[in-house]
Amino acid sequence: GTSESKIEGISLTMQKDGNNMAPRGANDNDHSDNDDDSDEEIRPVEAGGFASMNKLRLLMINNVKLDGGYTSMPKRIKWLQWQGCPLKFLPPDFDLKKVAALDLSYSNIIQLLKKPEWSSGNK
């Protein structure tokens, strides 16, 4: 298989740079005046990039926005750390069935799931 299919853990932390996000260790002087991302608070990462990581068990993505659908996210994630998550709720197509540890501190989450699976129609 591919090398991506062997990955069991990944950590990606973007460091806040004023209102912008920059990779940790990025030099503040490297920002150009005509940078199109200058108004973005969080730089996006394509969710589909994790699709081939079928053995992924540890996912630490801090101050990151995932773009795209979540159905292709690996299903074996046991530990999800998403500090600074920009979402208000986790999308229903993000499979959390095997997650044993969930860290969403410093996030915008107000409700874990938009429509919880355990809901029996009660409001």
Image (cartoon, rainbow, N blue to C red):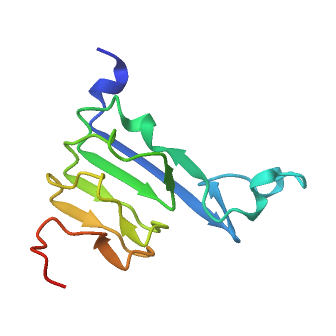
Where residue 73 sits, quadrant-wise, is: top left
Foreground residue among 76 and 70: 70
Residue occupying the point 45% across, 35% down: 49
Q: Quadrant of the N terminus?
A: top left
Q: Quadrant of the C terminus?
A: bottom left
Residue lying farthest to the right in this orientation:
33
The tally of labels here is: 0
Residue lying farthest to the front in this orientation:
121
Residue lying farthest to the top in this orientation:
1
With 85 as the anchor, is 24 left or right in this view? right
Residue 32 in the image: x percent, y percent?
86, 51
Where residue 82 sits, quadrant-wise, is: bottom left
Residue occupying the point 41% across, 48% down: 11
Position of residue 19 relative to residue 37, above or below, is below
Residue occupying the point 61% across, 54% down: 43
Residue occupying the point 36% across, 34% down: 51
Position of residue 79 relative to residue 103, above or below, is above
Position of residue 35 relative to residue 91, above or below, is above
Residue 92 in the image: x percent, y percent?
29, 58
